[in-house]
Image: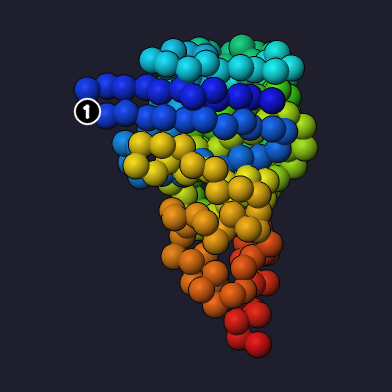
């Protein structure tokens, strides 16, 4: 379990406050640009100390933070070297990306989208007690977002926290959080959280108003709820 015990962070007039606990499962954190999602991810990872409060990691031994920009994580000059730096088999990782590359491909010759796919394949190639994904859908097209969501929905162990602005394609999640007016707010478990989610996509809000609340956020759940409106 990850516990945020009355933490605060400040930078000039900007401030963030967070209090709550993250248990095993997939958590979605949303908020406006500049609200503090990336800062919160850094605090959870232990890479940024809050001004006040404490972060407690109970039974958490392994932590991985994936930032929005994949080049920040790059350590290998070739794809093979990059996979080896994660302790992973290059051929297996390459197959999982669906890219037409080899272990000898120069890492910096990949586009940002390709590099993102490689990085995420490495990040998801090993289990972590705490996996923090800051804007994992950026630089990906729709088909890759869907493929990533399928992979994320298979995460059955540990704590996964997704920080995102995504408004269309989501994995199955267990709990929704959002940053509102400088404070992290717990919207609760699904599906009840959808009625309290201020940053919900417009389609979700429409379904909630129509009293056809989806069971979750996957495309299948959204379609099922939308079909109930037509009935």
Q: Is residue 24 left or right of residue 186?
A: right
Q: Residue 59 location, x and y as percent?
A: 74, 17
Few, some or many residues within 10 Å of mark 1 (<14, 14–19, 20+): few
Quadrant of the rendered structure where residue 57 is?
Answer: top right
* Quadrant in which residue 79 is drawn: top right
* Residue at x-position 31% and y-position 36%: 34
From this view, report whether residue 47 is shown above or below residue 211.
above
Secondary structure beneath dot 1 equals loop
The answer to whether any part of residue 79 appears in the image is no
Question: On screen, 222 above or below 199?
Answer: below
Q: Quadrant of residue 96?
A: top right
Q: Which residue occupies 57% across, 32% down?
A: 20
Q: Residue at x 67, y 46 (%)?
A: 174
Q: Is residue 106 left or right of residue 217?
A: left
Query: In which quadrant of the rendered image does the C terminus lie?
Result: bottom right
Residue at numbered disc 1: 13
The residue depicted at 48 percent of the width and 17 percent of the height is 53
Relative to 16, 200 lies left or right: right
Relative depth, front residue between 81 and 27:
27
Frontmost residue, 138 versus 190? 190
Q: Position of residue 199 (x, y in %)?
A: 43, 53
Q: How is the image coloured?
A: rainbow
| Location of the N terminus (image quadrant) | top right
Q: Position of residue 43 (x, y in %)?
A: 48, 20
Q: Position of residue 6 (x, y in %)?
A: 49, 24
Q: 83 or 130, which lies in front?
A: 130
Q: Is residue 52 visible?
A: yes
């Amino acid at each position: 379990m990850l516990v945020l015990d009355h933490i605060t962070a400040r930078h000039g007039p900007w401030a963030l406050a967070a209090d709550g606990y993250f248990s095993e499962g997939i958590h979605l954190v949303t908020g406006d640009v500049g609200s503090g999602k990336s800062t919160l991810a850094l605090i959870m990872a232990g890479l940024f100390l809050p001004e006040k409060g404490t972060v407690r990691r109970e039974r958490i031994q392994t932590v991985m933070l994936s930032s929005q920009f994949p080049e920040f994580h790059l350590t290998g000059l070739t794809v093979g070297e990059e996979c080896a730096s994660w302790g992973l088999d290059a051929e297996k990782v390459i197959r999982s990306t669906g890219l037409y590359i080899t272990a000898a491909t120069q890492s910096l010759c990949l586009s940002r989208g390709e590099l993102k796919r490689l990085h995420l394949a490495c990040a998801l190639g090993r289990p972590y007690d705490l996996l923090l994904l800051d804007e994992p859908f950026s630089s990906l097209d729709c088909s890759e977002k869907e493929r990533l969501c399928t992979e994320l929905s298979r995460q059955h162990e540990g704590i996964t926290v997704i920080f995102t602005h995504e408004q269309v394609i989501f994995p199955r999640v267990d709990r929704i959080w959002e940053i509102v007016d400088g404070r992290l707010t717990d919207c609760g478990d699904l599906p009840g959280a959808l009625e309290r989610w201020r940053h919900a996509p417009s389609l979700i809000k429409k379904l909630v108003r129509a009293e056809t609340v989806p069971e979750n956020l996957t495309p299948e759940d959204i379609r099922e709820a939308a079909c109930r409106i037509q009935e």
